[in-house]
Amino acid sequence: MLSNQEVAEELLGKFGDQVFDFEEPYGLLTLSTTREEIIPMLEFLNQHKTYQISFLTDITGVHYPDNKDKEFAVVYHLHSFIHNFRIRIKVFISEADIHIPTATGLYASANWMERETYDFYGILFDGHPNLVRILNIEEMDYFPMRKEYALEDATREDKIDALFGR
Amino acid sequence: MADIELLPHNVPAQSELPELIEELTTLNLGPTHPATHGIFQNILQMDGEKIVSGEQTIGYIHRAFEKIAERRPFYQITTLTDRMNYCSSPINNFGWHMTMEKFLQIEVPKRAQYIRVIMMELARISDHLICNSILGVDSGAFSGFLYVMQKREDIYEIYEEVCGARLTTNMGRIGGMERDLSTTALRKIREFIKTFPPVLREFEKLMSRNRIFMDRVINVGPISLERALSYGFTGPNLRAAGLDYDVRVMEPYSSYEDFDFSIPVGQSGDTFDRYNVRMEEMWQSLKIVEQALENLPEGPYYADTPEYYLPPKKEVYSNMEALIYHFKIVMGEIDAPIGEVYHAVEGGNGELGFYLISDGGRAPYRLHFRRPSFIYYQAYPEMCKGSTLSDAILTMSSLNVIAGELDA
């Protein structure tokens, strides 16, 4: 059984101050890294002889419009079947320079996950073989999951934000 | 009499044969095609009968669930989840409830957990039943399908008895079940346990060792374990390729550790293995339902979480506190704690994950569904490359791609 402590220390030893913001919400090891180190880190965890964290569960994006220069987060969920160990890695990027390298070289499944993230948030995955919209129509000229696009019709007065806590 | 010129017998109609042109044919499989069981398009490049390459277009029934969820109170998100994999909606519903319970750290009573297990396993049976019988239809064996449809109807009647709906179930609530199992529901489940095995056995007899069926599905659409893992396969499709990963065993939720069942695995990851894995899983699910029903604990069927579980109607009219909570829940005025959580359940097609980020508001800040169909469907062109069109249909059918889950 792998412990969060053990993996965190191993990553700290390998990547130094490039890994930070360690957390354990509900027991799941969560950490952040930079976009320069994300692919080496995925590769390191994948090739690691004992950990074998080699299953990509999920890639998704999050938009934090008020988080200056860190407006977007790309969240990777990884899983090791050998140790039944999950890890969550976050990479924060700014809206002005919304690029991150692709993980398609390591995981075939990253292809559509990244396309979906691009489709909804406009995050550009450099080196992706076919970075086009996947669920929305090609003609769409905005990224709908960003927070500036309100879900409700702005002209409606019966559904005010206060009722929904926003 | 004029001379009649007799033509020699074997003269070709055209003296010069046209040159053979080597070119690929483009074939549109879908968006609406009876064999795709859902709205998605495959643009295939065909060399005669063989598929050279394919490209998928998906998103035809995309309904922006993740966006909608950002404006909904937590208890209203359940209705979004059952529209994802509509062949096994209770699993999706409970998956979401369990995510919320994990997030709020609610301990659900044993009875509710067992009822959930019963409903989830019935849902798994109905999911696999449809997949396997449709596979029969696509390979030309229609009768089995109609025969097992009757048993799915029985499962839907149980759903009806438990929650009132058949397809989009909205079953259970955050904190437990909305009501206890009625005597009619219990009777119907018992009846199902008794009447289902002969039907499934007969279906198995009709299909599993049927020479024609075997010839149609063995070595069709195979995928190696390595590729399957790289493509993010989970669930029956991964197990057919040879890895016994099952969320129910790996990270037991809802008391799955109490039950005795085994995980069937295949070897070659072809259509026949996928069929067999699903077949055996139905038997195992039935076993779990039997055990859960036999050991169904007494006690409450919902947890004491007044902020999320609607109080009984009688109390709303007589008890001030209940009235306040009722109002607050219905109006969505409960502020959730801050935090993020990932919870996975074993859906009909694999690991169904819910990634929830809450900023302390009344709706999720971000909710992402890890939808197994969406992730493994991208392997489809690779799996049917070089096979014939009719085999590609079987491959898709055995992957059990559900359009609602694919597009969310």
Image: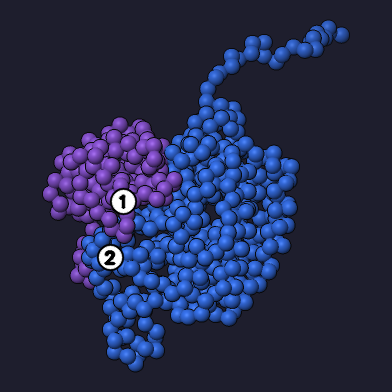
Chain colours: A purple, B blue
**Residue at 55% across / 64% down in the picture?**
B259
Left or right: A89 in relation to B47: left
Say what secondary structure mark 2 lies in: loop
**Residue at 44% across / 62% down in the picture?**
B253
Q: Could you tell me residue A30's position as x and y percent?
A: 27, 51
* Distance between mark 2 and mark 1 Cα atoms: 30 Å
Disc 2: CA contacts within 10 A as few (<14), some (14-19) or many (>=20): many
Q: Could you tell me residue A47's position as x and y percent?
A: 37, 35
Say what secondary structure mark 1 lies in: helix
| Residue bearing mark 2 | B363
Q: Could you tell me residue B138's position as x and y percent?
A: 63, 46
Left or right: B50 in relation to B370: right
Q: Is residue B154 visible?
A: yes
**Eyeballing the image, is B267 above or below B161?**
above
Q: Could you tell me residue A83's position as x and y percent?
A: 41, 48
Circle 2 or circle 1, nearest the eye: 1
Q: Amino acid at mark 2?
A: Ala
**Eyeballing the image, is B403 above or below B91?**
above
Picture quadrant of residue B197: bottom right
